Image (tube, rainbow, N blue to C red):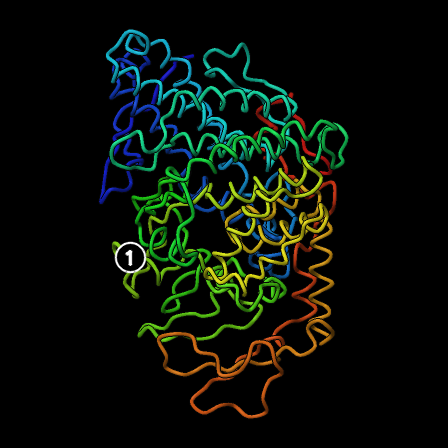
Amino acid sequence: MTLVVIITAGSVVSCKKYLIENPVASIGPDAAFSNVTNATESVLGAYAKLAGDSGYGSRFSLYYTVDNDEMVGPANASAPDNDRRDIDRYEANPSNAQLELPWEQMFAGIERANICIKYIPKMAAYSSGSTADQTALKRLYGEALTLRAQFYFELIRNWGDMPALFVPSADQPTLFIPRTDRDVIYNHLLDDLLTAEGLVPWRTEISGRDERITKGAVKGLRARIALYRGGYSLRNSTGTMSRDADYLTYYQIAHSECSDLIARRDEHTLEPTYQGLFQNNIDAHTLDPNYEVMFEVAMGGGTSTSDSKLGYYDGPRVNALGNSSLTATPTYFYQFDPNDLRRDVTIAAYFTNADGTKVLQKLIGLPLGKFRRDWITNPTISVTSAAQYFGINWPILRFSDILLMFAETDNEINNGPSAAAISAFNEVRLRGFGGNATLANTAATPTSYAAFFNALVNEREYEFGGEGIRKYDLIRWNLLATNIASTRANLTLMLNKQAPYANLPQSMYYLNNSQTLVYGNSLYATTPAATPANNTKVAWVSSLTTAYITSVAQLFQPNHGELLPIPLQTLQADPVLTQNPGY
């Protein structure tokens, strides 16, 4: 078998897009790892497998993450489509068109990382080069270990037990490889990340800024993987949801990592405003100054292999352009406190006309709002542009997750939250309410184990809506089936005008010809009899139907839908690989 390494050309554009991949050659390892520059390009080649349609450009960010209790994907027509809509509704089968390429891309990323992990420590400069070369190469080695961990983490949380490949394919005695229990792989990744922590720098230890991994990202990813290692998952061996008896061992790892990060606010902390993080930084192609986004996927280049469809597939349409395919459940919209500013960032209630005026949408059609075409700057997108790729980065890990993981693990370890856990929880909540402690009601934060856990379940939903986290949170808590059922039950109460939804407006009004969305009546009171002057009426709660309620995670089955089916092509190519439960 011939071993090749993909060398890429990195580029820097407006202090961004350092990781855009421009392949220029396929060469052997002697050349690829002959110097720091080439080794850097090889690691960038591994980074590149995070991006594009088959990475976090759409499949792992927008397709696989729904349906859940917050966001749903587009509904099926009269029959299965063997595509993204079947995945949304938990109807995917092994031949689904959206499974094979993402699976292959994650393993391609693992292969690229494995090559780097093998050869970088063998470079003469790794142990005997200049101080600068040794520092750079150790960072690259740590980055490769971290990237492999991220690729494997994504595979495991979608497909369960995986073939364990920790050396390049050229070194494998056979490429017919059975599954390895996910806990074995997770333990390997946790050890790898501990090693990587000692190799990559803190972000303040490097000059300039790009989208490469630093120590905060490594520690945060290690905390996240430890939580999943300690959480529930659908076991291939038993076909049931379970977690190990020693789960608190892994919660302690996550707790320690988060404690370290909270102690280093000079490295990462919250942005002052929730909306600003998305509108002024992520959507504006500007790296946030407080480094709240700790790990992100660099997107750019406008192609299906290097960019993302964020703002096109999911956000509010502009001049009838865009899909708006991820929409909030009505119960999620009304679960927010009216004073929680995160609601109107997470959920965009409007579409935009060519002249910039806003049009209110029906309650059952409110799109995800964090990645919006009309928020994109540097450069702005013309209202007539038919482009689908806007270069918006996908945020894998934010500092608010560190605070909430710390609070969650503290509550579990101590059977109730400490003052530090409550403080971390309140810090996230307080920002959601614009810093107003009275509106956030932080004085009422629960102090018992069960009540604090329930508050965390809700707070993570408010904080991370539409960021591809909720479905997997519910799985690791073994709450996905419960919350799907309760969402449908609450939607039925809303449809039937029963408490706590009895007084919601059946219709809403919005001001005509306005550049901002201005409601003509209350979101929380019954609809007035007369349409206000210069307003348009839109179906609101009255847009809810039995068919919509039925469609939410329509064919989800517990102990089955928590995992996707292994792609048929993969099973055919590897006769020792087995399918997931029920497929």
Task: State which quarter of the image contains the N terminus.
Answer: top left
Instruction: Give me the residue at 74% from left, 34% from top.
Output: 242
In the drawing, does residue 483 fall left or right of residue 148? right
**Residue 245: x and y, percent?**
75, 28
Vertically, is 328 above or below 140?
below
Vertically, is 426 above or below 116?
below
Vertically, is 38 above or below 63?
above
Vertically, is 318 above or below 563?
below
Image quarter of residue 539: bottom right
**Residue 463: x and y, percent?**
52, 53
What residue would you read off at disc 1? 377
Q: Residues within 10 Å of mark 1 (few under 14, many from 20)?
A: some
In the drawing, does residue 205 fall left or right of residue 423? left
Can see residue 312? no
**Residue 582: x and y, percent?**
73, 38
Image quarter of residue 233: top right
